[in-house]
Image: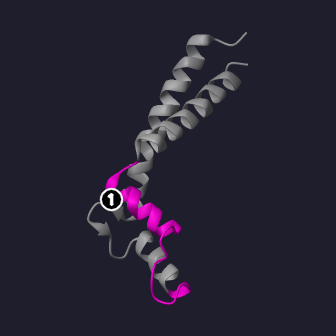
């Protein structure tokens, strides 16, 4: 029988880690509030996307969306979705590890 406290703890930890790690990972990759950091992975992605699009970054592209999140943070609905996914994964991992 799975331990309900362990599963609840896994859900809390998974949800928290998901919400905290996304801004940290984006900042580390170079998607910052001040723009894309020079010499970063984000700068390389932007350069590649610009070459592929004839010199500009397409609205709605991966680079544009990641920069938007890096600069402004996650929206409430995205935070809820990300937290829920992290909680589900965390509780599933806790359940499987208790078997």
Which residue is at 73% across, 19% downward? 99
Which residue is at 28% across, 60% downward? 33
Residue 14 sits above or below residue 8 on the image: below
Residue 9 sits above or below residue 75 on the image: above
Which residue is at 41% across, 46% downward? 75
Camera-nearest residue between 10 and 80: 80
Q: Quadrant of residue 56?
A: bottom left
Camera-nearest residue between 36 and 53: 53
Quadrant placement of the N terminus:
top right
Spot occupied by residue 71 in the image (x, y as percentages of width and height) = 32, 59
Q: Look at mark 1 in the image and give the residue it sits on.
A: 71
The answer to whether residue 71 is magenta is yes
Which residue is at 55% across, 30% downward? 87
Spot occupied by residue 64 in the image (x, y as percentages of width and height) = 45, 68
Spot occupied by residue 11 in the image (x, y as percentages of width and height) = 55, 25
92 to the left or right of 57:
right
Q: Residues within 10 Å of mark 1 (few under 14, many from 20)?
A: some
Spot occupied by residue 45 in the image (x, y as percentages of width and height) = 48, 74
Coloring basis for residues: one colour
The extreme left residue here reads 34
Q: Quadrant of residue 38?
A: bottom left
Part of the protein shown in magenta: 51-74
- Secondary element at tag 1: helix
């Amino acid at each position: 029988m799975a331990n309900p406290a362990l599963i609840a703890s896994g859900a809390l930890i998974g949800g928290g880690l998901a919400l905290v790690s996304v801004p940290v990972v984006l900042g580390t990759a170079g998607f910052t509030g001040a723009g894309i950091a020079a010499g970063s992975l984000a700068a390389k992605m932007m350069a590649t996307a610009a070459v592929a699009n004839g010199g500009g970054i397409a609205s709605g592209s991966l680079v544009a969306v990641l920069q938007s999140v890096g600069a402004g943070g996650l929206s409430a609905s995205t935070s809820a979705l990300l937290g829920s996914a992290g909680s589900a994964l965390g509780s599933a991992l806790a359940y499987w590890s208790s078997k």
